[in-house]
Amino acid sequence: MELRIRQRRLSFEEFAEQLEVFARENGEVGTLGLRHIQRLCAGKLTPHQLRPATIRLLEKYLECSAEELLSPPEVSVSSVERTKEKSPRGSSALAVVRKRRGYSQESFAQEIGVEFSTVGRWERGTHQPHPWMRAKIAKLLNVTVDQLADLLETSSQMEDGVNRREFMGIAAGTTLSASTTFRPPLSSRAGETDLRYLLERTARLRRLDNYLGGRDTYSLYASELASTAEYVRNVSCLPKIRTALTGVVSEQAQLVGWAAFDAGMHAEAKKHYSDSLKAAKEAEDATLTGNALAFLAYQEVSTTGPNIRLAEASFAAAEKDATPRVRALLLERKAWTYAVAGDRQATEKALTEAKLALHSESSRPEPDWVFWVDDNEIEIMAGRCWAELHRPLRAVSVLDTALARFDDTQARDKALYMTSLAHALIDGKEIERAALVTQEAMRLAQGVGSARPSARIRGVVHRLQDFKNSAAVTRVLEQARN
């Protein structure tokens, strides 16, 4: 049950409040307070100790049986396998677009004039909005009514990884096409308008990486880079504009390099990162130069091993001109290199500096390529570092808190970070929970267009083979073989 609550990114208090609203809206007489929720999740209450009305309320709201919700973890995992995860998977295509427009379920519901639980049912695909409401919903989401119909059609539960990729592709494609319906032709003599258009388009493309893997985005990103590079080579413009356009080329090359890296195309990734570094230097952009070096260092950690000199060079290149988020990003990546190299003191120092940097005051605007760097990102990296350094007591608490803020639309990242949690749990001798976390990571990784989750999962599975006497581990090993 606790896993179901976390998948919805809710605290126990928020879950209690939503359950109360759901009961009121649906005429359910069952009730469940915070203290009882806590006891249920701790295994201190059984289904036989609950009123039938309360059991019915839980089953209707979470859309699975009370036996599955309240059984011990090993039985619960088995039940999930048998029922093919018929409970909600977190978010749908409609939810993706809503979030990208900056609305929570509550704020979106207020704008429309419905209860937030109604929005939740639309996103789970169990109900459809009335026809007369669709024009208002479409306007809020900045999509057409036809595009909204596509979102609603795909806002049902994802039965497997292929469907997840399909509905995420529809969601991503809808938001991209909705924002690029009108594409003004680029001028033969480039000016500020052309530069702004290319930057905004690059920003929209960048956000696809939140939900799609490198195998899904690489061709799109590479095509965009080729088009932009060709335009910059041949256009007439003032030196200042050309310098800025060259910076756009550097940004896009980093984007393509990241997609290649995520897809397991390491030779292509290194080439794109090197091209990005060359363009960043030509544009005299110290922060882009530092980021290109950081990408190269991050890739080496996964291929040839930690390159501390390169990681330190990335921060040194950008340090003077870095905004708070850029500084925090480069410091956390440096911390990762230190962690893989086994240097605990240097790791802790870099992580501490990253947290301080993120909250330092600055009037300068942040570049869009660090839009995702926030407290949770720093916490996730801290948890990963402590897991890498075999400090399970520090890693588990940090990763548990940070992962609770992720939903299934971010399947690749969530699966990756859960493998770090699984490693830390193994180090802490919490084998059954490590198996449960690994199984969840495997579910999330199905159909994700990224080579990294499966590689990380294989590493966890290899370690779990030493604990075959556990029924939970046996199930994970069998699932891995299949």
Image: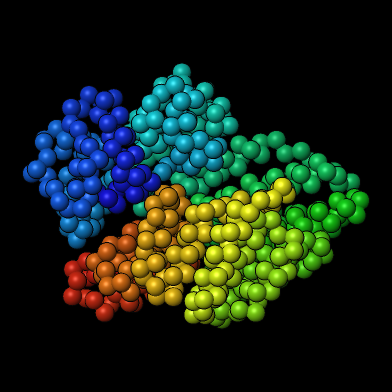
Q: From the top left corner, tell me how far across and down residue 250 is, in percent.
A: 73, 60
Please tell me which residue lies in front, 78 or 288. Answer: 288
Q: From the top left corner, tell me how far across and down residue 442 is, in percent.
A: 35, 62
Instruction: Please state if 175 lies on the left or on the right of 109 as rendered.
Output: right
Q: How many marks?
A: 0
Q: Relative to 89, does residue 462 appear above or below in the rendering?
A: below
Q: Residue at x 9, y 43 (%)?
A: 49
Q: How is the image coloured?
A: rainbow
Instruction: Please state if 389 lies on the left or on the right of 15 as rendered.
Output: right
Q: From the top left corner, tell me how far across and down residue 280 is, in percent.
A: 76, 63
Q: Relative to 111, does residue 156 appear above or below in the rendering?
A: below
Q: From the top left corner, tell me how far across and down residue 162 is, in percent.
A: 41, 53
Instruction: Please state if 21 lies on the left or on the right of 178 as rendered.
Output: left
Quadrant of the image for the C terminus? bottom left
Please tell me which residue lies in front, 3 or 393. Answer: 393
Q: Residue at x 56, y 79 (%)?
A: 306
Q: From where the camera sits, is residue 164 visible?
A: no
Please tell me which residue lies in front, 209 or 292. Answer: 292
The single residue placed furthest to the top in the displayed view is 132
Q: Residue at x 57, y 40 (%)?
A: 175
The single residue placed furthest to the left in the displayed view is 48
Q: Residue at x 63, y 74 (%)?
A: 311
Q: From where the camera sits, is residue 328 visible?
A: yes
Q: Quadrant of residue 139?
A: top right
